[in-house]
Structures are given as C-alpha cells and as structure tokens.
Image: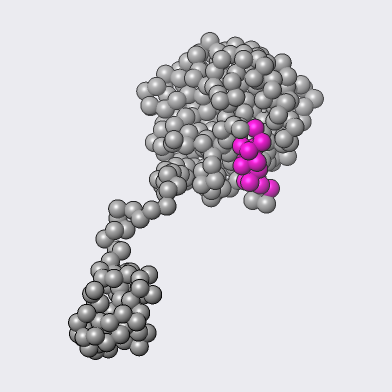
Amino acid sequence: MATLVIAEAGVNHNGDLQLARQLIEAAAEAGADVVKFQTFQADQLATTKAAKASYQQETTDKTENQQSMLKRLELSFDQHQQLISHCRNSNIEFLSTAFDDPSIDLLNQLNLKRFKIPSGEITNLPYLRRLGGLGKPLILSTGMANLGEIEAALAVLETAGTNRTEITVLHCTTEYPAPMAEVNLRAMQTIARAFDVSVGYSDHTAGIEVPIAAVAVGATVIEKHITLDQNLPGPDHKASLEPKEFAAMVRAIRNIEQALGDGIKRATAIEAANLQVVRKSLVASRAISIGELFSAVNITAKRPGTGISPMRWDELISRPSPRAFAPDELIEL
C-alpha cells in the first residue's frame, strides 16, 4: 500500500487566500496526496491569557497573545469552499484539522473524506467523542503523549463508533523544529505493537531524512509542513519544507516503497543475468589425466558459474576423472 503523504499547509497561508491556493498547487506539484490546513475559531481555541509557544514567540509579533495571532489566521466557511474547489482542480485531497466544536461542524458540512486529530486534543474527551461519532477514517497525532494517553484516546474513539481499523496513529515530537535526539522513531513501532493499529509519522525535524526513514520502518502516513518560503513571517514557516525539498522527500518515499518489496528472499529476475558471471564452478587447477582422482591439488573453484557448483566439492573429491582436463577447464562428470 502506498504511503499517504500529507503536505501540512497549516497556517502557512498567513491569512491570505491567494497564498493558500499557491500552497495547494505546490503540494500537488510536489507529489503529495493530501494538503492539510487548520480550521479554528480563535476565541474557541484559546483564552486571552494563553501564551504563545517559544517557537511562535520567535517568529511572530512578541507583543500579541496566542488568541490574537490565531485570529489573523482563521479561514471562513466560504474560504474553505474555495480551497476545496481549488484542491479538486489541482487533483489533490483537501484536509483540515478542526480545533474546536464549531470547526468540527464546519468541516463535517463540507463532507471531508477523513478527519485529523491534532496532538493537543488527544486528552480532550468531548472532542474525541464528537469525532469518533462521525463514522469517518481518523488520523490521531500523538505528540507529547504517552502510551496510556494513546490507549485512553483510542478507547474513546472506538466507544463513540469508530473501528480501530479506521484509525491511523501518528508518532510525533511536538517541537519546531524537533531535534533529532528527541525523535525516538522506534516509538512508532511500539505504538503499532501495543495497539494493533496502522501507524505513521508527523515530522517536525529539519530536512527530509526522518520521514523517509519512517516509511522504511512501517509508516503508512507521512505528514510534513510545506511553505513557499521559509523566510515568510508566521509561526510555522521555518519548520517547513519549501516545494523543491518537499518534492525530493516524496520521490525518496516512493523509491523506498519500491525498495521494501514483498519480503520474500529470492533471486530476482534482474539478478539472473549476473548469477553465472559472479558465481564459481569447479575447474581444473592443472592438467588432469583420465582416471586421476580429483583432489584439492588438481581442482579449484573459479568463475564463471556455468559448470558444477563448488557446493558439490565433497561429491567429487576422490572420484576418478572421466576424461583428461586442461588447466582452467570446467570439470564435467
């Protein structure tokens, strides 16, 4: 099954609908399957007292609170419809993360194919119940969570009506950018074993190595931020990939998918042409007379592999030669 690659446009549109359209186009051209935005009402998501994260402080106006920052990044119902239409024309799936009840209702009206639960909502019981009751495939991000919290969230979603087979759990490190030493990619495999779920990886590291590695160790979904320019103002641009680098990541993921194969160890069709060239056969190491006994003195193994396999060495030793052999001539019986 092909890895679902999600280009996280998030709030990198900076409240500009034209920039949002360009992000959709860039994601589609880079080979992503899905482009994801964020849907919220700032006054429903954060209080006026909520502080910004340190990475947000560094990349936005230090004098504003989190709610004020978010207010500038809201998308209206009409804007959602326009972006969905643009995704349809660009041949890429539209997805958005809802962060509050009105936003869940908005996205549900728009008939999204699937829903994404962000890391910050994994302990939000009423939120989980609402999404679990929608009957849609769910992607659950688990940044900052431990196994107990993941187990509890899955139980809520299942009780609400979503079968575990419809849930993909993403391992994630919630820091922008995430240090390599904090990634703990093996935790993704731990989640898969612990809960018997499909798993994926939401990446916040710099570069493309970790999401590629995640596919190699079992990720079925990869999520990565995309921006048109890392130097644009806004909270997430610096932790995002620009289009060319995002496209390189997608190409690498598709190559890894092919390289993983079916797991059956066998000689491939392309190897068959090389087999006789690089394997060896039993040959005369010097002239051998008819009737002379084969021994380590007069036979050896050399390329090509078109004659008797050296694995039959013990079968030949001490047998009389059926005819005379010249040096380097393939032994025949």
User: Is 5 included in the stretch rendered in magenta?
Assistant: no
Q: Quadrant of residue 173?
A: top right
In the rendered image, is residue 60 in sight?
Answer: no
Check the image and report above or below for 167 versus 203: above
What is the quadrant of the C terminus in the image? bottom left
Q: How many marks?
A: 0
Please provide percent x and percent y for residue 198.
56, 33
What is the quadrant of the N terminus in the image? top left
Taking the spot 69% from the left edge, 20% from the top edge, the residue there is 156
In the foreground, 108 or 219: 219
Please provide percent x and percent y for residue 14.
57, 29
Q: Quadrant of residue 163?
A: top right
Please provide percent x and percent y for residue 11.
58, 29
Check the image and report above or below for 210 versus 116: below
Q: Main secondary structure of the magenta part?
A: helix
Q: Is 287 displayed left or right of 198 in the figure?
A: left
Q: Which residue range is magenta in the image? A: 182-195
In the foreground, 208 or 230: 208
How was the colour assigned to the protein in this rendering? one colour
Please provide percent x and percent y for residue 45.
70, 21
User: Is 192 included in the stretch rendered in magenta?
Assistant: yes
